[in-house]
Image (cartoon, rainbow, N blue to C red):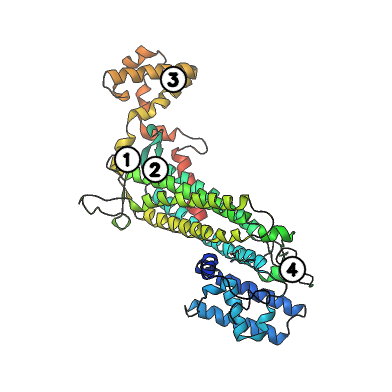
Amino acid sequence: MKRVVSRSGRFSGGPAADVASFSESISFDWRLWEHDIRGSIAHATMLQKIGVLSGGELHAIQDGLEHIGDEIEAGKFKWKADLEDVHMNIEAELTRRVPAGAKLHTARSRNDQVALDMRLWLRDEIAALQGEVRELQQALVELGAAHAEVIIPGYTHLQRAQPVYFAHHLLAYVEMLERDFTRLADCRDRVNVCPLGSGAIAGSTLPLDRELVAKLLGFVDAKGKPRLTQNSMDAVSDRDFLVEFCAAAALIAVHLSRLSEDVILWASAEFNFIKIADAYTTGSSLMPQKRNPDVAELTRGKSARVIGNLVSLLTLLKGLPMTYNRDLQEDKERLFDTADTVRACVRLMAAMMANTEVNADICAAAASDPQLLATDLADYLVQKDMPFRQAHHVVGAVVAHCEKTSKALNELTVAEYRKFSDRFGDDILEVFDLKKALQRRQLTGAPGTKEVAKQLAKWTQSLGA
Ligand code: ARG
């Protein structure tokens, strides 16, 4: 009875022992079981409709598959490596229990079956990941809103640049994650197409009802119209949808890696802008004082393998002749690893951000550095009709003078300022009022007081944060 599904007729014996262990995929593709069963039930329902199965046979198959599903869920199902993959394990066991099981694979190949399972699995996975992305956005918005008054230096080249609200910095990541969310939705659109009915490569001579299968499995457009792959050869060998997902996921990983880097810097004694809760840090086995931001570091580190998975997939595909080649079995571990890793990173990052305190005093001290407002000083001169290039030069000279005399920009007198330009008026020192400086920033997208409040309110509302 062994290998009744895979090696009927033509083969005199099974593959050599190490070929079986080399080529099995059950050790990792078992996790497609739920989607494999869903796909088989839809296929059987269609086979009954076109007269290949009787009503009784369909019932027996459906019942048998559901039982197998229950056993798998309960951890009682025995996976057999010599049955290679999830598809053959389930079908062989079904056929052992239900004679009509031998009709289930009518006009179906594992080539269109595995393409179907992956699409079904990924569709669910995308929805789950989108949910986690939303939660991370919420955590960031909540942290920003809880510290809406906090101002920090914004950095370019990791050098202090201009003041920004802490919330503005966090909302930058909310924007990135929003693009990630829509990228996933976009990817889902191309995942959501039904390949079943493509057979091994060239469809079938039997009058399958592909539309029915697509509808049963929810492969429909916004109007409920079934969405079918349009070329059987493409359908069995297309893995673009996996590449797209792994690319979208890699970009999420890169965004999280950047956020991790900010968090790691902010949590250092040198910055000390935030304190991550104990539960999300670890100590050192040697240095008793340490509180290491391991969650952030691992998130940064794990982005490497997610990027690697994307490159692996592209490399896997690039030299394949049409159509299905067994190489494609190598897609699964890369896909699963990306999905699992990115979801864990997003989830942990959300939890960590929700358990982070902001050291408002330290942030205020850092943000009070008057050099952060050197550009405002130049803008002041521009308002007094000085060309910007000249204003930049004048303020540069003031900064150089302050450096030489070890004075802060706001420690010079009006008279001293006027030595650099007679456009400096009595009101010049007001430039250094940080609150007013942020109120002056009124552009859409700028870290102005009103604009950041508006953005926080918008996100709080749309995310239900
Ligand atoms: N385990 C296989 C995979 O993941 C399923 C498809 C096998 N098809 C075949 N013709 N051997 O790709």
Ligand 1 within 8 Å of disc 3? The answer is no
Tell me which label, 4 or 1, sits earlier in the chain: 4
Q: How far apart are marks 2 and 1 (CA)?
A: 9 Å
Q: Nearer the viewer, residue 179 or 374?
A: 179
Q: Which amino acid, mark 2?
A: Phe
In the rendering, which numbered label is found on residue 166? 2
User: Tag 1's secondary structure?
Assistant: helix
Please give the residue where the numbered disc 4 appears in the rendered image: 211
Please give the residue where the numbered disc 1 appears in the rendered image: 363
Mark 2 closeness class: few <14, some 14–19, many ≥20 residues within 10 Å: many
Q: Give the answer, above or below, for where 418 lies relative to 136.
A: above
Q: Nearer the viewer, residue 412 or 132?
A: 132
**Residue 232: % across, % down:** 73, 61
Tell me which label, 3 or 4, sits earlier in the chain: 4
Where in the image, quadrant-wise, is ligand 1 located?
bottom right
Q: Distance between the residues labelled 4 and 2?
A: 52 Å
Q: Which amino acid, mark 4?
A: Glu
**Residue 145: % across, % down:** 41, 49
Mark 1 closeness class: few <14, some 14–19, many ≥20 residues within 10 Å: many
Q: Give the answer, above or below, for where 185 lies relative to 370.
A: below
In the rendering, which numbered label is found on residue 392? 3
Ligand 1 within 8 Å of disc 2? The answer is no
Q: Distance between the residues labelled 3 and 4?
A: 67 Å
Q: Distance between the residues labelled 1 and 3?
A: 27 Å
Q: Which amino acid, mark 1?
A: Cys
Say if mark 4 contacts mark 2, CB within 8 Å: no
Say if mark 3 contacts mark 4, CB within 8 Å: no
**Residue 16: % across, % down:** 55, 70
Find residue 14 and report its image quarter.
Answer: bottom right
Residue 305 is at least partly visible in this image: yes
Q: Which amino acid, mark 3?
A: His
Say if mark 1 contacts mark 3, CB within 8 Å: no
